[in-house]
Every structure is written in C-alpha cells, then in structure tokens.
Image (tube, rainbow, N blue to C red):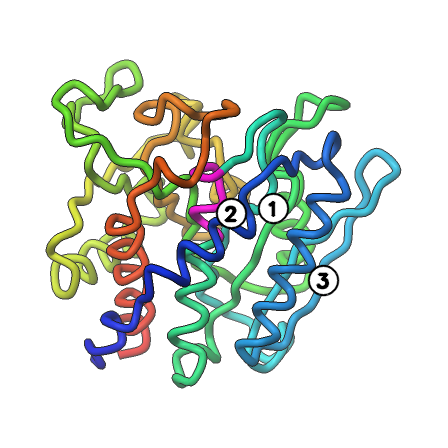
Amino acid sequence: MNISLIDRVNKENLREVLHCIEGLRHGWWNYEELEKRADYIKGLFTEYGYIVEEQVFEFSHRLYRNIIATLKGTGSKKEWLLIGAHYDASHGSPGADDNASGVAVMMEVARIIKDLPVAEGIKFVAFSLEEPQPQTWNFLIGSKYFVNDMKKKGFKYRAIILESIGYINKAKGSQLLPPFIKGPDTGDFLAIISNRRSIPLMKSFEEAVERNVPSLKVVSRVVPLNGYLILESRFSDHSPFWDKGFQALMLTDTAMFRNPHYHRVSDTSEKLDLDFMTDVTRAVISLCLLQHA
C-alpha cells in the first residue's frame, strides 16, 4: 500500500471547498445557490480529470442534479466502491458541517487518488435534496432516485457516505447518544454506522484506520433492522443503499448528538476542525487502497 498518499491531504484544499460550498443552499428556498454549488462540484471533478455525468431528476416541477464522477464513465463497470456526500443544506443554515464538510473530504479523496488504478473502480457522487423539502414528508430524495435507478440498471455498490464530519468537542459530556445506545461522552471521535449486511465493509474501514490513521478515534455501531429501531441512524444517504440490499456505511461526527449548531444559522466553517477532517480524508483514502490491494 502506498502510505505516502495519505500524507498528501491538504488542509487548504479542504478549507477552500468548505468555503465554496458553505452558504444558504436549500433545495427549494435557495434553488439558484444550490445550482451554483452543483456547477462548482462538476467543475472541480472535471479539473481533476474525471468524466462527470449528471443524473437529473424532477421534484415539484424543478430539476435537480446528482453529480457523478468516474475515470472512465459510469458504464465502464458494474460493481463500484461509491464515495458520496450531499451538497444541499437545511433551510436557513449555511451548512458547513452539514454537509460542506462531507463534500470537502470527498473532493480531496478524488484529487489524491485520481492517478491511481484504484480510482477506476470508484464512483464519486454528490447527492442533491438530502434535506427535507416543504412539499413532502420525504427526504433523501436524490439518493433514493440514484439507488433506484442504478439498481434497475444492474449496478452494484459498496458505499461510503460522508455526513457531517467536521465538528469535534473534546470536553467531557459534549457527546449525546440516542436512547439505549452506550458510547463515549466526549465528542472527539468519528462514528461508523453500519447495518448487519455492511459489517464486512465496516471491518475493512476499521482496519484501514488502525493501520494507517491511528490518530483517528472511531466508534462503530451496527444497527438492527436497517436502523428502523434507531431512526436517527437512517438520516442520511446511506439508508437507500441499505434498503436495496447494498453494503453502506455512514461516517459522521454524529451531527445533532454533538454539534449544537446542527441545522442552525450558526453552522459555519470556522467552528470545524480541519485536523479531524484531514484524518477522516486519510482514512477514506486508506480504505480505497486497502480495497484495491
């Protein structure tokens, strides 16, 4: 494994993408701003040398885009390791942690591995409309459309979903937990959320961290019944993959269980920890290399 690659993670790149994605960009209330973010992500993937395809879908008489990046086109393989993050934000929030942080890490992974053979088997997806919209009780609209469409076309996935991965708090008592879940009470770890089917992928990620990013604290949890007993464990784009039988992990700082700025106007980038995001980026790169070894 080429360990030196993980040392190429650049904090300034993470910071730049954070700043470019951050800002009001709710799918309905800030449609034009959301479209600008889609164009930015598309442009950056293109700059890195990827083939970029748009998966366009309609919601409430408007068109939205999932941005898909691969080295040789989405049809070049049937089985993929997918790395994804949603680029929209909740209504009224600039959404730095949720989820500019996930987009920033995804883009830095894409930049670093772009010249490696392993990249040919990785599909990067920036999902739209993860957040709730005023016309429906449904959410995860973009990822549900993606998974349903791709399953019909015969594609298979193991997915890593990056969801709110920039906020830590090293004070004791800073970490809350869902009912009946035991874990640390200090909010300085990355949570790995898996269902039972995804345990092999979870074990691979744990191995990648242990081997190459020992500074990153991780806490893994396997939720039963695809998370329906702990509904908060389904609040991101991994759950449509679970529902269609694919392995998927959510990597998260636990969002509302740690970050007091979750879905608030105060969710801004200066509150995020770039060292933590750097370690998360290194861990995802390590997983990509481990899966290719």
> Which mark sits nearer the N-terminus, 1 or 3?
3
Q: Nearer the viewer, residue 188 or 207?
A: 188
At x 34%, y 42%, the residue is 166
Q: CA distance from mark 1 to mark 2?
A: 8 Å
Q: Residue furthest top?
A: 179
Which picture quadrant has residue 142?
top right
Q: Main secondary structure of the magenta part?
A: helix
With 17 as the anchor, is 126 left or right in this view? right
Residue 241 image label: 2
Q: Nearer the viewer, residue 84 or 194?
A: 84
The residue indicated by pointer 1 is: 143
The magenta stretch is 96-103
Tell me whether the residue at label 1 lies in contact with that at label 2, contact meaning CB atoms closer than 8 angstroms: yes
With 256 as the anchor, is 216 left or right in this view? left
Nearer to us: label 3 or label 2? 3
At x 84%, y 33%, the residue is 60
Image coordinates for residue 283, horizontal then vertical, percent: 26, 59
Q: Residues within 10 Å of mark 3 (few under 14, many from 20)?
A: some
Under circle 1, the secondary element is: helix
The residue indicated by pointer 3 is: 54
> Which mark sits nearer the N-terminus, 1 or 2?
1
Nearer to us: label 1 or label 2? 1
